Amino acid sequence: MTDQRRRASGPDDSVAARAQQAPRLSRSGHRSAAVPSPAAGASPASPATASTPQHWLPAAEAAAVILLTIVALAVRLLWLDEIPPGLFYDEAYKGLDALQMLRERSLPMFFPGNFGREPLFIWILAGAQALFGAEPIVLRTTIVVLAALTVPALYLATRELLGRLPALFAAAVLPFTLWHLVVSRVALRFVLLPLVECLAIWLLARGMRTGRRRDFAFAGLFVAACLYTYTAARMLPLLLAVGALGALILRPKLALARWRPALLTPAVAILALLPLGLYFVQNPLAFGGRVDQVVAGWEPVVDPRFGPGDPGTIRENPVRTALMFWVAGDQNLRTNVPGRPVFDPVLGIAFAIGIGAALAGSRRPAGLFTLAWLGVMLLPSALSTYAPHYARAIGALPPAAALAGLGLATVAQAGARFGRAGAIAGLAVALAALLFSARLALADYFDVWANDLGTYRAFDTGIWELGLAMRALPSETTLYVSPIPGDHPTLAYASRRSDIRGYDGRAGIVLSPRGSAAYGVIVDVDRTTEPMLGDAYPGSSPRFIALDPGAQPWAVLTPVDGAPQIAPRRRLDARFAVAGQLIGVTLPDRLEGRTLDLTLYWQANGPTAQPLTVFVQLLDGTNRVVAQHDAQPLAGSYPTVRWHRDEIVVERIQLALPRDLPAGEYRLIAGLYDLATGERTGAVGADAIGDAVLLDRLRH
């Protein structure tokens, strides 16, 4: 048995173990004090390893990692043109930013739109679109390739820290972790972080082993690259500080021997970060703006911008984050099967075993560093709202996979103490666990996640289809959309149009004055625009209908032609110095009930320099205001700065009436004013009274 163990230990399971066998500093920089692995020397390798010639092992490892990378790539490319559907708002936003870079031939250090974004992934998307065109498949294939490359990067980092066998298992765990599988098919910047992060950790750990300056220098370059990738990477300097402190405590001789070359890492990182740092100095709000929005407080604060759900508190969210590996994961459909833990029960056990194996070597800093890596990179989720949050915790995915790989390696090696049969059994159990988890993850993604009806909305599928229908129209067609903004990134990316006029049709409609136009309507939300279009343009009908997964109309595109027909109850003659004319009003004959419903008809002169607010006032016999409504046109969705000449803006207004409104005659007036100054815009015409327009006299 002793001989067998000696033979099995020939090709060591970790680079650190090889360093232990070289007590003197060699020309290559190997040293006995190098960072060892918690797994190194703890148990023998598998029989296959023991019987394999040492010179063949690196080629076998390389072949295994290459195969795993190819498999990861193939799984992520499978049905990529259909799953996920559509193109999510954030994906399209990044694609448009990249296209703008190409048009302007610029290299921004930071993108302030959409809550602020680091630039590295957008730079990569710019290159991909320049080469292959601007389509969702290009955006998503780009992230798929980067995600697949994370497999060998994780292998390198884990091998340097924990050994060969844990590294191979980690490289097999990552491609079939549902967390990584879901996010790696969506073109979002945070998916790039694990790749760059693993390369930084690998080079830093190798530098500690070899003492080579170039390893530390390149580690600094990749540390800086992490901070150009995603906001959560700002935890990385804390991790490096924890690692340095751990080395001083647990391996003081090694730390003292390496401190000079190790200084290259922060030096190179600082130099590489100077452009981004200069941007933040010039724009300090950009640095902390997004962090301030998502940091958890002592009391839960629901922010509708970030969707439904329980945001949690600073007391609850660290626990939720810690339990996401075994109990309940992210609820966001874009990153997970809602609520599914990171690991299934089998890999969850392996992950727990890996944590125990890393802790068992308390004098072996590589295992402790891996645990610190996990803990530090979980902080962005633990300290923010809506935890667990897979995007903010993405930096913890590589160490989580590494620890699960360590757990599987521990199981595989445990049987070796019982001889060859035990070694084979241990390896078989570990491989069976891996295959079971892989099958479960694939089923969860392609059978459960892909068929979830919520993905249609989560990835803006209807908006994408509507945009494609708009792209097919002649370029001279005037395009309107309701009730989303005209510059919605998904719509803009799909339609290739930057001049779509968006408004909220639930508050009225904008009628094209003449010529060819088309109206896109999200009928799932806005059920009023289509009937109004039918009244204004008789004979118009939808040319395109996007159906949701339940085969119900979700969005329609209706072309119209010619001048619109309007029929206000009372025609008005009132012209404003700016903005346009108030040409009609529709309202009841008398005041009844608690509200007065009226419709104003504006004809635009063109855009105004400043956004103007519409006011409607009900005056009693003494000119006292008894009811008032103030808002920018169409509930703020179509401000006067966006009006186009001769457009007719039909605005529905609901004026709340007081409970105790006395009987009598009242005057209803309307007008425009500048909210910033309070100054009203003057009006002239038969129905103008000073700086307002008399809409009607009503009795109550």
Image (cartoon, helix red, strand yellow):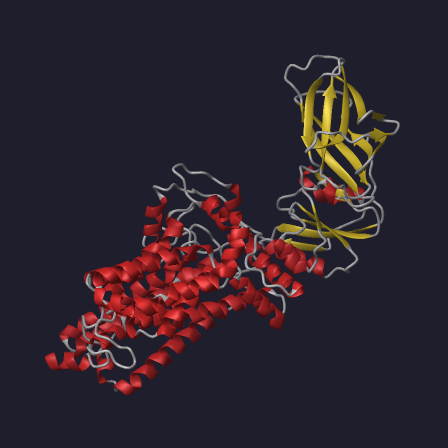
Position of 683 relative to 648 (above/below)? above
- Compare residues 314 and 502 and report the one nearer the observer: 314
Depicted 674 relative to depicted 372: above or below: above
575 or 626, which lies in front?
Answer: 575
- Residue 511 position within the rendered picture, expressed as x and y whole percent measured from the top left: 78, 44
The residue at 38%/41% (across/down) is 313
Task: Name the residue rendered at 78%, 56% in the picture.
Answer: 477
Front residue of this view, candidates 356 and 366: 366
Q: Is residue 572 visible?
A: yes
Q: Is residue 118 visible?
A: no
| Residue under the point 47% across and 53% down | 333
Q: Is 15 positioned to the left or the right of 276 in the image?
A: left
- The quarter of the rendered structure image containing the N terminus is bottom left
Could you say which quadrant of the image residue 366 lies in? Answer: bottom left
132 sits left or right of 11 in the view:
right
Could you say where residue 44 lies in the image, as x and y percent from the top left? Answer: 19, 75
In this rendered view, identify the residue nearer to me: 447 or 15. 15
Query: The C terminus is located in which quarter?
Result: top right
Q: Quadrant of residue 638?
A: top right
* Left or right of 656 in this view: 476: right
Depicted 444 relative to depicted 281: above or below: below
